[in-house]
Structures are given as structure tokens and as C-alpha cells.
């Protein structure tokens, strides 16, 4: 799969930015700002420094507008600038952030609890021994209500930061896997593993929430 | 990947790749074949789809007013200096 290039929307937006259109710029700042701050915060020590990194990244974006060639989507390009600045700033703070600290210590483990499957000595080894709760019978207003969204939001907030950011960019904001991989400087495998673990944990939280709803 | 049938335990670990369409053809075929005859894995795959769809309904937080002001000012001085 190729990296998503600048879309028609990106190029139109780029024209407005180069022409000094403040509304277009602030729209972009509001769309990407919160995610940029969270990503910066993974690499630096405080929220205040993360805010400075985001400001520096926007300056870098403005100064680089004339050099942007549309080889990556605009948002990927902006995040690459951000991540570079954040990493450099983190190093200057003497802060070294091991990958496991932000990605989670559990990446090599299965995303599903092994006790849900028959163990290797048993018949049908590796097949389901306990199926997850089946929520298909629940009325839709129970499964898609505000409480459900809150349960999902809370589950995402409690993930290790890089897992949380990958699922936010992919599933909340709808970025492609290539955009996320390039924006966050991840390998293809790491992007997939982080996303899978994140989705599996959020699915689990959703299951628990809907099980309790069904018993209420 | 061998030709051996994959167990449910292995299939669930491939679901993100399956949904993203990034599995190698042979592995994708294994998963598809398994799903045809496994109600449990089919349900869990649907649960992944529900999880993704519901996540897509979450809203992003907002930029703080102070940060917005600082960045707006930076934009104005950039524009003035062009």
C-alpha cells in the first residue's frame, strides 16, 4: 500500500495557507492540535513543554509551506515535523523514552486472554473454551448510547500512550495505516500490533460495559 | 505460514490485519475459511467492527484558548514577515 499523497482537499487547503488565510490555518490547528499535544507529551516531560513543541511545530509548518511537495498527506507531513521537534526536545531535556514505555510492555503477548481458549493438552486445543459475551441480541439504543461511548473513551484513555494514539488516529479520526505509521515514525508491524492490542482492549471494555447493561 | 488449520486463538490475533486488508493472500485465505465455519470467531470479528464504528463516534478534545491565541499570533507575525 502506498503512502497516501496529498489529496485534492490538501492541495486546496495548502493554497489557502500559502495565501495567508488565517481561518484555514486555525481550522487546521483546531483539527490537529489536540492529537499533536498528546503525541508531543509522549516525548517531553511536561504539558507546558508539549505546548511549546506544538507551537514550534506550527512555526516549522509555516516556514516549510513552500517546500511541501505533497508526497505525503498534509497531516502526515505536519506530524513528522512535530515528532522530530518533540524527540529533539526530549533528548535535550535528557529524557530518553524507551519504546516500551510509551508503546506498552505487553506487545509480545497475545491480545486475547489465553484462558479463553482450550490449552494445548486438551482436545480442540486453541479453540474457544469461553466465548465473549454476545451483545447482538441487545436493542441498538442500549449498545450505541452515550454511556457506551463514554466506556470506549475511558478504555482508550487508559491505554499506554502510543496504543491510545494509534487507535485515536486510526479509528476515532479515520487516518489510514500508512498515514499513522509515517506520522508517528512506526514500522508497519508496530503500527498493526499497537492497533490490534488497543482494539482488543477496547473491545473487551465494550464487552464488559454491554454485559452490565444487559443485566441492568 | 503453514497449511495447518489455524486455531481460534491464532485467528483472533490476525483480525486487525484482516480488517485492514494487510494480510498476505495465503493467510487471508486461512482466516476467511476459518470464519466460514466458526461462529465464535465470526462474532468476535463483528465485535471488532462494532468497536471501530463506535470509536468513530467519539469526539476529539479542543485546543486550549491560550494555545490557540499563541498560535494565532505566531501565524500573524509569519504572514506579516512574508
Image (cartoon, coloured by chain):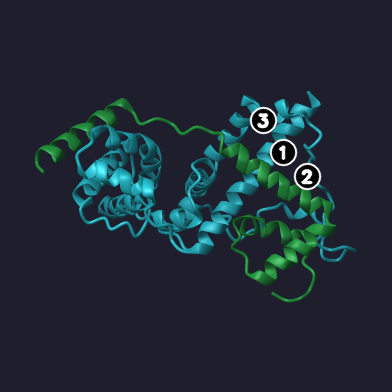
Chain colours: A cyan, B green
Q: Is residue B57 left or right of residue A131?
A: left
**Residue at 65% over, 59% down:** B18
A36, B38: nearer the viewer: B38
Question: Badges 1 and 2: C-beta atoms under 8 Å apart?
Answer: yes
B42, A44: nearer the viewer: B42
Do dots 3 and 1 share one subunit? yes
**Residue at 35% over, 31% down:** B63
- Indicate the position of residue B40 as horizontal and vertical percent values: 81, 51
- Quadrant housing residue A9: top left
Q: Is residue A30 visible?
A: yes
- Indicate the position of residue A150 as horizontal and vertical percent values: 59, 29
Which mark identifies residue A207? 1
Please identify the residue farthest to the top as the structure is shown. Answer: A216
- Quadrant housing residue B23: bottom right
Indicate the secondary structure of the residue bearing disc 3. loop
**Residue at 54% over, 33% down:** B58
**Residue at 28% over, 51% down:** A85
| Residue that badge 2 annotates | A132
Which of labels 2 and 3 is toward the front?
Answer: 3
Answer few, some or many: residues within 10 Å of disc 2's Cα (few below 14, many 20 plus, some between 14 and 19).
some
Indicate the secondary structure of the residue bearing disc 2. loop
| Residue that badge 3 annotates | A144
- Indicate the position of residue A187 as horizontal and vertical percent values: 47, 63
Which of labels 3 and 1 is toward the front?
Answer: 3
Question: Badges 2 and 3: C-beta atoms under 8 Å apart?
Answer: no
Q: Is residue A23 left or right of residue A153?
A: left
Please identify the residue farthest to the left as the structure is shown. Answer: B81
Q: Tag 3, which chain?
A: A
Answer few, some or many: residues within 10 Å of disc 1's Cα (few below 14, many 20 plus, some between 14 and 19).
many
Amino acid at each position: 500500500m502506498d503512502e497516501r499523497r496529498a489529496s485534492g482537499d490538501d492541495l486546496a487547503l495548502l493554497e489557502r495557507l500559502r495565501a495567508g488565510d488565517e481561518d484555514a490555518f486555525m481550522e487546521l490547528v483546531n483539527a490537529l492540535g489536540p492529537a499533536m499535544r498528546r503525541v508531543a507529551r509522549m516525548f517531553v516531560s511536561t504539558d507546558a513543554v508539549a505546548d511549546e513543541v506544538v507551537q514550534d511545530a506550527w512555526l516549522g509548518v509555516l516556514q516549510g509551506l513552500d517546500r511541501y511537495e505533497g508526497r505525503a498527506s498534509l497531516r502526515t507531513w505536519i506530524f513528522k515535523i512535530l515528532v522530530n521537534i518533540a524527540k529533539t526536545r526530549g533528548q535535550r531535556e535528557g529524557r530518553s523514552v524507551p519504546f516500551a514505555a510509551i508503546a506498552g510492555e505487553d506487545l509480545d503477548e497475545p491480545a486475547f486472554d489465553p484462558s479463553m481458549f482450550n490449552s494445548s493438552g486438551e482436545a480442540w486445543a486453541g479453540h474457544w473454551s469461553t466465548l465473549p459475551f454476545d451483545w447482538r441480541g441487545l436493542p441498538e439504543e442500549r449498545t450505541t448510547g452515550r454511556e457506551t461511548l463514554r466506556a470506549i473513551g475511558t478504555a482508550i484513555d487508559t491505554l499506554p500512550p502510543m496504543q491510545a494514539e494509534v487507535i485515536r488516529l486510526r479509528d476515532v479520526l479515520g487516518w489510514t495505516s500508512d498515514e499513522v505509521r509515517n506520522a508517528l515514525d512506526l514500522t508497519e508491524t508496530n503500527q498493526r500490533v499497537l492497533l490490534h492490542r488497543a482494539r482488543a482492549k477496547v473491545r473487551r471494555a465494550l464487552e464488559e460495559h454491554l454485559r452490565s447493561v444487559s443485566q441492568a | 505460514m503453514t497449511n495447518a488449520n489455524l486455531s481460534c486463538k491464532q485467528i483472533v490475533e490476525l483480525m486487525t490485519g484482516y480488517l485492514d486488508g494487510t494480510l498476505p493472500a495465503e493467510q487471508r485465505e486461512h482466516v476467511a475459511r476459518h470464519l466460514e465455519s466458526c461462529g465464535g470467531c465470526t462474532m468476535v470479528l463483528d465485535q471488532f467492527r462494532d468497536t471501530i464504528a463506535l470509536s468513530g463516534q467519539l469526539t476529539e478534545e479542543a485546543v486550549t484558548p491560550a494555545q490557540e491565541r499563541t498560535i494565532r499570533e505566531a501565524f500573524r507575525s509569519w504572514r506579516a514577515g512574508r
